[in-house]
């Protein structure tokens, strides 16, 4: 299999890099370079070290492995990525990847290497927990045929937006509509038009009053677009700005601080972000292997329900399921889901591993519950994967109370109950930031695992 020069990046070929006799990887792959990078970024040649950022910061380190040597080599290669940085040319923020934040995104280089290593050329790949669409984007760059699936309606919209190649005409139209919405909001601000609706207490607490009014006007402008194709993109543009324009201190925090934003700032940010999205989409289109690459198929549904899962057969599944008891996607996205008016009922009932639900459980039975949820998911995948094909998972350990939920062990148990055989695993230590449960990882550190199962 040779996918050649894609992603605007030069690959080392179709196999992981050569190893030394001690089995350690010899050199950092060149496919981590940014398309426009000379490879001489800050932090080299005696410059100050690069500042690291966000969840993709905590990568790297020794790799523990078991299973099939050929699979292990691909998994290890996928894990050997550099921490993300604040630099503009950081790969985790390249083209469409950098448009909108999303919790627990997969590192794009890991996604790229897993998709390339485990899917035949031109094959059909399924990501049943596609989130913001990282695996789908990378699969398109490899010339694969990706299908994405997620229960979170925001994820579905975001993944569709990022994986639908647009013409220049469509991008210009989107920016033109953004200008109209911005002009509408400016006009309402200058004429002190007031609010178009009554705001809930949550929004009043989260935004300065004049920012809330501007956001309200922008949303009114976007909604007035009706069925215009630019509408969903512009809703996502607004969504990408909501936390930054609120008093929330961070995307992942409920803490509220102070922020003084000038009149008109929210509207200027909106227009700037719409232009940025157009630029990112154009850059992504330019990296695709041909002008005729179709959009990824993206659908909303529950990955444990066979009737909802997209029809197969797929050549590979590459995905990162939620980590048990770690996130509440519904809570995390509450602000965005509310402003976009998205229906959250399915996510409320079907979110796998949701922290709020697991936190109410006895830690001793949480492992069994998690195996049950994973078994449901794997059985659904068994129905759509070709026999012998790989199902590749990126998953981290978590903890409940003082009990560690070891993802590798629990996945192996679920695999045996659902028609899969554990084929290989590569695991790297990851920090655990939750003080009260740190005792769970005293004997053996918390790890992130790249796992291959094969359909029996
Ligand atoms: C770790 S995130 C995936 C992140 C993604 N790989 C990315 O790079 O953006 C896990 C995803 O699983 C989704 N999810 C949770 N429960 C689900 C279910 N029952 N069916 C489908 N998706 C679900 C969440 O909405 C979330 O987007």
Image (spheres, rainbow, N blue to C red):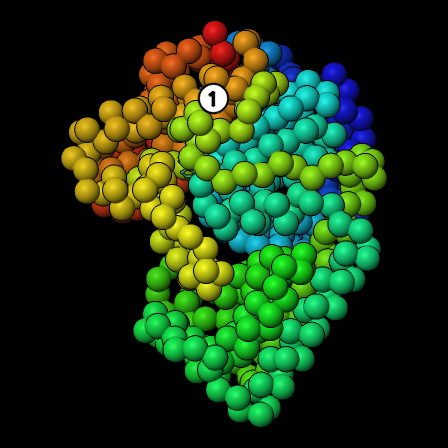
- Residue 262: image quadrant is bottom right
Residue 347 at x, y percent in the picture: 38, 44
Q: Give the position of the N terminus as an image quadrant.
A: top right
Name the residue at 25% across, 39% down: 358
The correct choice, above or below, for 69 with respect to 437 in the image is above
Query: Nearest the camera: 132 or 195?
Result: 195
Q: Compared with residue 142, is residue 169 higher up or lower down, i.e. above or below? A: below
Circle 1 sits in a helix, a strand or a loop, which is it?
helix
Q: Nearest the camera: 421 or 419?
A: 419
Q: Which residue is drawn at 46% across and 60% down?
A: 341
Q: Is 420 in front, or is 433? A: 420
Cβ of mark 1 under 8 Å from ligand 1: the answer is no
Considering depth in this image, is 277 or 364 the residue closer to the camera?
A: 277
Q: Is residue 312 left or right of residue 171?
A: left
Q: How crowded is mark 1: few (under 14 residues within 10 Å), some or many (20 or more)?
A: many
Instruction: Farthest residue to the front: give it.
Output: 227
Which residue occupies 44% across, 41% down? 151
**Residue 444 visible in this rendered orientation of the protein:** no
Query: Where 409 sits versus 327, above or below?
Result: above
Name the residue furthest bottom: 191
Q: Is residue 265 visible?
A: yes
Which quarter of the picture shows residue 412? top left
What residue appears at the point 32 percent right and 42 percent down from the top-left corner?
A: 349
């Amino acid at each position: 299999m040779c996918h050649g020069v894609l992603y605007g990046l030069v690959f080392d070929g179709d196999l992981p890099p050569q190893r030394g006799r001690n089995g350690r990887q010899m050199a950092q792959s060149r496919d981590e370079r940014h398309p426009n990078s000379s490879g001489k970024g800050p932090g080299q040649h005696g410059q100050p070290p690069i500042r690291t950022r966000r969840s993709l910061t905590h990568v790297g380190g020794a790799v523990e492995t078991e299973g099939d040597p050929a699979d292990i080599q691909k998994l290890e290669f996928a894990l050997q990525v550099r921490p993300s940085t604040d630099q503009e040319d950081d790969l985790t923020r390249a083209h469409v990847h950098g448009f909108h934040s999303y919790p627990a995104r997969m590192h794009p280089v890991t996604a790229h290497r897993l998709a390339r290593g485990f899917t035949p050329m031109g094959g059909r790949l399924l990501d049943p927990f596609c989130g913001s669409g990282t695996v789908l984007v990378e699969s398109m760059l490899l010339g694969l045929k990706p299908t994405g699936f997620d229960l979170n309606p925001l994820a579905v919209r975001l993944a569709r937006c990022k994986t639908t190649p647009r013409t220049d005409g469509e991008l210009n139209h989107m920016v033109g509509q953004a200008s109209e919405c911005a002009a509408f909001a400016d006009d309402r601000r200058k004429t002190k038009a007031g609010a178009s609706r009554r705001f809930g207490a949550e929004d009043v607490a989260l935004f300065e009053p004049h920012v809330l009014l501007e956001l309200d006007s922008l949303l009114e402008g976007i909604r007035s677009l009706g069925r215009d194709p630019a509408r969903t993109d512009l809703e996502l543009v607004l969504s990408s700005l909501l936390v930054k324009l609120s008093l929330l201190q961070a995307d992942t925090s409920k803490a509220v601080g102070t922020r003084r934003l000038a009149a008109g700032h929210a509207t200027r940010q909106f227009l700037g972000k719409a232009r940025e999205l157009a630029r990112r989409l154009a850059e992504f289109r330019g990296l695709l292997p041909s002008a005729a690459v179709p959009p990824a198929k993206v659908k909303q549904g529950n990955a444990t329900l066979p009737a909802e899962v997209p029809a197969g057969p797929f050549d590979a599944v590459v995905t990162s399921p939620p980590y048990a008891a770690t996130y509440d996607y519904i809570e995390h996205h509450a602000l965005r889901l509310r402003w976009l008016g998205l229906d959250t009922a399915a996510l409320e009932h079907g979110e796998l591993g949701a922290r709020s639900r697991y936190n109410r459980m006895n830690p001793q039975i949480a492992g069994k519950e998690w195996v049950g949820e994973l078994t449901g998911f794997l059985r659904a995948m068994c129905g759509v994967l070709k026999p012998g094909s790989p199902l590749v998972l990126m998953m981290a350990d978590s903890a409940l109370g003082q009990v560690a939920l070891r993802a590798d062990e629990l996945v192996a148990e679920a695999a045996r109950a659902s028609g899969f055989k554990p084929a290989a695993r590569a695991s790297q230590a990851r920090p655990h930031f939750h003080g009260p449960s740190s005792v769970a990882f005293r004997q053996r550190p918390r790890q992130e695992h790249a796992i291959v199962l094969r359909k029996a």
